[in-house]
C-alpha cells in the first residue's frame, strides 16, 4: 500500500442481475483500474471477473462484517487506493451491503462515485407500466408473519405502488398476507428479470396467490398497485371490455365471452374470435371457452 496525501476514490459499481451483457463499459474500466474490489462474495465476483478477463485483487465485504471491513477499507482509501464496491448482483446498497462503507467514506471526505447499472428494482419498475411518478420500495418484507402483517398494515394508506423483493420459498405466504392486509389489489410478479426464463405474472393478488400454490422458482420482484387504481372503470367497447374482464375482473375466457356477448348484444362467436386474439397478447395461450377453467395470473 502506498502512502499518499490524496485519498483514493470509492466506486460503487452495479453488476448484472442475470444477463452478463448488462455490464457497462465504465464498470469494466473501473473494475480493471482500481487497486482493490470489495465484494459481497469473492467466489461469485471472481467468476464475473474471470469472464471479463479482469485480474484486480478481491477482498470480501459482507453484511455480517460490514463495520469491521468498512474501517479497514477506509484506511486503504485514506492511503490513496481506489476501491470498487460490488455486490453479488445489481446495485450495492439496495437490499445489499454497502451503506456502512459509503457513509464512512463520506464522513471522512473520501470521494464516492456511482457506476450505475442493473438493479432488479429499476428493471421491474421500468417495465411495469406504472403511470404515477412515485413508488414505495420496501426491500424484503419481514420474514415472520406477525411482523410482515404489521409492516404491510403500515403501508395500507400509501397512494403509490409498493415494490418488494421476495424469495421464492416465501412468496406464497407473503402474497397471502398482502391479500389479507391490503385487499385484492392488482399486482405484478416479476421473475428472473433479464434471464432466459424471464416472465411477469400479472393479475389480482388473489390470482397470484392461487398461481403461487404451484412452486415458483427464481428471483422475484413484487409490485402491488395502490387500492385506488385497482378498480378500473369498465370500458364500453369490445376490445376494452375483453381486456377489462381479463385483467381487472380476473374472469376465465369462457365467462368473459358469455358476459360481453350479453353486455353488448354481440354474438358469442364474434366475441370469442376477438377474445382469442386479445387473450394471447400476453403470450399465454387462451383456454378454450368450453373448458371452464379459471385463469390465475397471466404471463406477460
Ligand atoms: N442489490 C440488488 C439489486 O440492485 O437489484 C438486489 C439484491 S437483493 C439481496 C436480491 C433480491 O433482488 C432477490 O431476492 C430478488 O428479490 C431481487 N432480484 C435480484 N435479481 C433479480 C432478477 N434477475 N429477477 C428478479 N428479481 C431479482
Image (cartoon, rainbow, N blue to C red):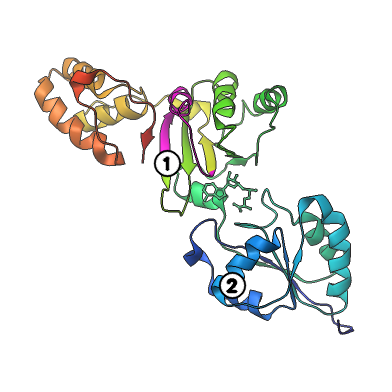
267 or 29, nearer to the observer: 29
Task: Identify the mark at residue 29; answer none if there is no mark.
Answer: none
Between the C-alphas of marks 2 and 1, the distance is 32 Å
Looking at the picture, does residue 79 appear above or below residue 20?
A: below
Q: Quadrant of the C terminus?
A: top left
Identity of the residue drawn at 51% across and 56% down: 18
Q: Quadrant of the N terminus?
A: bottom right
5 or 120, nearer to the observer: 120
Looking at the picture, does residue 15 appear above or below residue 280?
A: below
Residue 209 lies in the magenta-colored region: yes
Quarter where residue 236 is shown:
top left
Q: Which residues are magenta?
A: 200-219
Identity of the residue drawn at 55% across and 37% down: 168
Residue density around tag 2, few if under 14, some if 14–19, many if 20 or more, within 10 Å: few
Looking at the picture, does residue 27 appear above or below residue 186?
A: below
Residue identifier under label 1: 200
Residue 108 visible to the viewer: no
Mark 2 or 1: in front is: 2
Identity of the residue drawn at 75% across and 78% down: 35
Task: Identify the mark at residue 50; answer none if there is no mark.
Answer: 2
Say which element carries label 1. Answer: strand
Say which element carries label 2. Answer: helix
Residue 49, position as x, y percentages in the image: 61, 71
Quarter where residue 75 is shown:
bottom right
Counting every numbered tag in the picture gives 2
Quarter where residue 26 is shown:
bottom right
Residue 180 visible to the viewer: yes
Amino acid at each position: 500500500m502506498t502512502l499518499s496525501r490524496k485519498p483514493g476514490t470509492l466506486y460503487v459499481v452495479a453488476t448484472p442481475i442475470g444477463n452478463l451483457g448488462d455490464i457497462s463499459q465504465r464498470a469494466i474500466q473501473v473494475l480493471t483500474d482500481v487497486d482493490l474490489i470489495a465484494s459481497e462474495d469473492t467466489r461469485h465476483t471472481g467468476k464475473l471477473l474471470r469472464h471479463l478477463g479482469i485480474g484486480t485483487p478481491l477482498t470480501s465485504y459482507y453484511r455480517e462484517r460490514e463495520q469491521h471491513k468498512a474501517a479497514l477499507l477506509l484506511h486503504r482509501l485514506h492511503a490513496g487506493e481506489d476501491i470498487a464496491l460490488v455486490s453479488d448482483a445489481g446495485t450495492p446498497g439496495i437490499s445489499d451491503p454497502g451503506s456502512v462503507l459509503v457513509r464512512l467514506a463520506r464522513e471522512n471526505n473520501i470521494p464516492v462515485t456511482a457506476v450505475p447499472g442493473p438493479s432488479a428494482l429499476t428493471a421491474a419498475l421500468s417495465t411495469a407500466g406504472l403511470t404515477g411518478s412515485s413508488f414505495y420500495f420496501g426491500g424484503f418484507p419481514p420474514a415472520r408473519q406477525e411482523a410482515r402483517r404489521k409492516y404491510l398494515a403500515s403501508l395500507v394508506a400509501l397512494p403509490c405502488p409498493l415494490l418488494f423483493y421476495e424469495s421464492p420459498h416465501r412468496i406464497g405466504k407473503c402474497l397471502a398476507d398482502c391479500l389479507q392486509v391490503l385487499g385484492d389489489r392488482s399486482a405484478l410478479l416479476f421473475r428472473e428479470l433479464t434471464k432466459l426464463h424471464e416472465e411477469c405474472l400479472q393479475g389480482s393478488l388473489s390470482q397470484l396467490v392461487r398461481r403461487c400454490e404451484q412452486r415458483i422458482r427464481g428471483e422475484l420482484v413484487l409490485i402491488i398497485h395502490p387500492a385506488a387504481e385497482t378498480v378500473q372503470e369498465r370500458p364500453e367497447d369490445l376490445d376494452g371490455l375483453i381486456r377489462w374482464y381479463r385483467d381487472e375482473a380476473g374472469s376465465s375466457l369462457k365467462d368473459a365471452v358469455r358476459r360481453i356477448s350479453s353486455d353488448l348484444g354481440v354474438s358469442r362467436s364474434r366475441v370469442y374470435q376477438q377474445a382469442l386474439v386479445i387473450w394471447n397478447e400476453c403470450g399465454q395461450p387462451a383456454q378454450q371457452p368450453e373448458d371452464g377453467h379459471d385463469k390465475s395470473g397471466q404471463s406477460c
